[in-house]
Amino acid sequence: MGLGGAFDDILGAAQANSGWAFTRLHQWLAPAVSAYVRVQGVGDAEDVVSEVFLAAFTRIGTFQGGEAEFRSWVFTIAHHRIIDQRRAGARRLPTETLDRATDAVHAPSAEDVALPALELGRLRAVLDLLTPDQRNVLVLRVIADLSVDQVAEAVGKQPGAVRALQHRAVLHLRRALAAEAVTR
């Protein structure tokens, strides 16, 4: 769901450093950016989403364009942050932090943890059937709701290559899921 005719006013206010405008832009795009980051399997998705909006809001004064271009711009930043996170993760040892979620007294129920994890796990398992390029294209097209041209810009490919990757991804998933249904 977009901002419609209010986008230009909200963008102008954000470029003038108005807090309410930053809040509105964040409320609009954060759920989709968060979903994109989580599906990509980033360990600390909330940190990456925060980094995406910090980068976008820091450079918002340089942005020119409409609502669709802004959405594409934010998802391009997210795509680059995910790549950065993967590179950084390859260079450091995994760590665990203690917080209320891991404290037995305050921990959520097993059901509250398991159901979303199973759903996200199933989605990741299905997406892992694809090549990284196919997965990126499909997630940006479906979850981020970007156009072919916007995805091409985000991933640094030609629109024709994006269409081909999307087509091959859908065919591959269709075959894999049909074969899985037959074996059940």
Image (cartoon, rainbow, N blue to C red):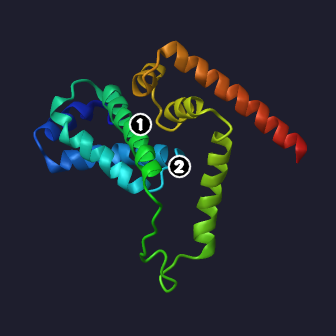
Q: Residues within 10 Å of mark 2 (few under 14, many from 20)?
A: some
Q: Mark 1 falls on what kind of element?
A: helix
Residue 129, horizontal then vertical, whole percent: 68, 38
| In the foreground, 70 or 6 | 70
Residue 36, horizontal then vertical, whole percent: 48, 43
Image vertical order of residue 1 relative to residue 120, above or below: above
| Residue type for callout 1 | His
Q: Give the residue furthest to the right.
A: 183
| Residue type for callout 2 | Gly
Question: Would residue 125 be found to the left or right of residue 73 on screen?
Answer: right
Residue, disc 2:
41
Q: Mark 2 falls on what kind of element?
A: loop
Residue 77, horizontal then vertical, whole percent: 34, 36
Question: Would residue 13 be found to the left or right of residue 81 on screen?
Answer: left
Q: Give the residue furthest to the top.
A: 160
**What residue is rendered at 32% in x and 36% in y?**
3
**What residue is rendered at 60% in x and 60% in y?**
117
**What residue is rendered at 41% in x and 24% in y?**
150
Which disc is residue 79 wearing?
A: 1
Mark sitting earlier along the chain (1/2): 2
Q: Give the residue furthest to the left.
A: 16
